Amino acid sequence: SAVISQKPSRDICQRGTSLTIQCQVDSQVTMMFWYRQQPGQSLTLIATANQGSEATYESGFVIDKFPISRPNLTFSTLTVSNMSPEDSSIYLCSVATDFVRGYTFGSGTRLTVV
Amino acid sequence: DAKTTQPNSMESNEEEPVHLPCNHSTISGTDYIHWYRQLPSQGPEYVIHGLTSNVNNRMASLAIAEDRKSSTLILHRATLRDAAVYYCILRDEAEKLVFGKGMKLTVNP
């Protein structure tokens, strides 16, 4: 299955600032996804990152708050903008490599906003 | 809203089989049933998936009801490493995985 490198693994940020999270995959993939996992909760899908077009956002998530880039088939970034303490979560990227092997998840970025 | 329903938690004993149930009564004909698990401080890990027929792999077995409205993940011999949160997910036509609350499995030594 694909190997995902997600950076940074953790960060502590000041409110009002922005953080960009990177997701690098070791093979070309069509679909990449970004999730948020709030403390003690399940994963919530933020958006699907599409190569060559704008990301598709889920209900409750907007591009101004979570801009996403997908410049090629192996890389994507998620920016958490104008952060508040409520944005403190783990952010994970995921890819669908092929139908047989399911979806692969990165190890996540643990974000704390103070 | 989550399309699947799982117990909040289950307990099992090490080296015994474990059956993890999942209800998905509103499943459509094209929805695949996926199972993932999340160990503490890690991202989710793929376990198994299926459409209609029962499936086996090195990690587990998936038994799917004939009407597809429920399924059961079977761990044939639980180990301490199997303690995790298990998610039963329906993958839709858009190929997204929408997670429900999951079920915490505790394995007792």
Image (cartoon, rainbow, N blue to C red):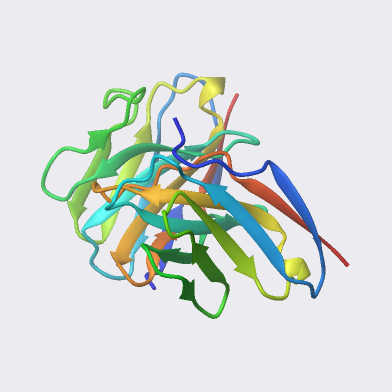
* Spot occupied by residue A60 in the image (x, y as percentages of width and height): 36, 22
Residue at x 40% of width, y 21% of height? A82
Q: Residue B6 or A7: which is nearer the viewer?
A: B6
Q: Quadrant of residue A19?
A: top left
Q: Quadrant of residue B19?
A: bottom right
* Spot occupied by residue A24 in the image (x, y as percentages of width and height): 34, 59
Residue at x 65% of width, y 36% of height? A40
Residue at x 72% of width, y 75% of height? B77
**Does A104 sit left or right of A96 as displayed?**
right
**Does B40 sit left or right of A98 as displayed?**
right
Seen as rendered, the residue at the extreme right is B109
Q: Is residue B78 visible?
A: yes
Q: Is residue A8 visible?
A: no
Locate the N terminus of chain A and report the quarter of the image it occupies: bottom left
* Spot occupied by residue A6 in the image (x, y as percentages of width and height): 44, 55
Picture layout, residue A9 above or below residue A67: below
**Does A63 sit left or right of A60 as displayed?**
left
Picture layout, residue B107 above or below residue B26: below
Picture layout, residue A32 above or below residue B109: above
Residue at x 60% of width, y 36% of height? A41
